[in-house]
Amino acid sequence: MTSTRTDRWLHLDGTTNTRDLGGLPTVDGGETQFGRVLRSDNLQTLSEADVRTLVEEVGLTEVVDLRTTAEILMEGRSPLRDVDGVTHRHFTLLPERGMRTDVFAAEESDEEVRAQLPADWAESILPRQVAAGDEGEPPAVRSYLGYLTDGTENVLAALRSLASGGPGAAVVHCAAGKDRTGVVCALALSVAGVEPAAIIADYAQTAEVIEALVAKLAASPTYAEDMTGREIAVHTPRAETMRRVLDLLDERWGGPIGWLEAHGFGADEQAALRTRLRG
């Protein structure tokens, strides 16, 4: 079984699940490059030292935020929002309830915006939606297929942002950095030609930090009820989940690349994303 290198972890004060997508083997005998794309849990608790590490040492220039508007407003600003030269892009993969807005502009008057959120806004926070017709699949698999069905345009937009960004590094994140982030990163790594076994292993690697990750999210009122209301095993990513998603993409679309091409992510965009990850 393919394993991922332990030096891909980036140990920060304010995150639990940050790692580099470099060092992953590709089907043609190469590997992805370090310092191009990172994946992470949420970033609002970054310390000043974390910000220096990301900006000065890693060379971060782009944040791709996959959370909902409600999550961003309830959790507050990331300190990276105050750093010149770091661009933030927001592509929610979950259906938004109530108002739709420029979320980063809304941060400037977040108390007023929060007051306008509908009573059921919290239902849009966690990955509950499922793809129709896949009732026989495990819940996590159905959720991930749901991102591709309900969040198609934003999945593609996140990948396009990675493809067109640079020359600095980008970080893709959601709340935990395992579900929404896991799907977008799996597609990006597929475009880069990473071995399927390595894509699966990278997804499952979050299990190494799951206890600390759940504890971090449980400390936030936004996520506390979900984190404490279910056993930790429910939150733990399993290799067979991503393996099943990749198998279904193979069966239905000829693979992740087939799904992307069928939805308009063309050869030039694929080449740009491959270059971003591989150099």
Image: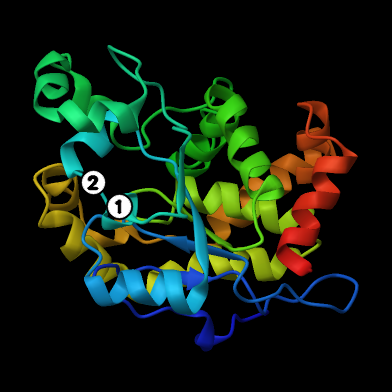
Q: Is residue 49 visible?
A: yes
Q: Which mark is residue 82?
A: 1
Q: Tell me which residue sits at (49%, 61%) in the image.
A: 39
Q: Residue at x 43, y 40 (%)?
A: 139
Image point (29%, 67%), residue name? 15
Q: Amino acid at mark 2?
A: Arg
On the picture, is 139 further left or further right than 233? right
> Which residue is at the front of the view, 212 or 270?
270
Q: Which residue is under mark 2?
A: 77
Which quadrant holds the C terminus?
bottom right
Q: Is residue 249 left or right of residue 60?
A: right
> Which residue is drawn at the image coordinates 18% and 63% (left, top)?
216
Residue 224 horizontal/vertical position (percent): 12, 48
Label annotation for residue 254: none
Q: Quote the CA–CA distance across marks 1 and 2.
A: 9 Å
- Dot 1 amino acid type: Asp
**Mark 2 nearby-residue class (10 Å; few <14, some 14–19, many ≥20):** some
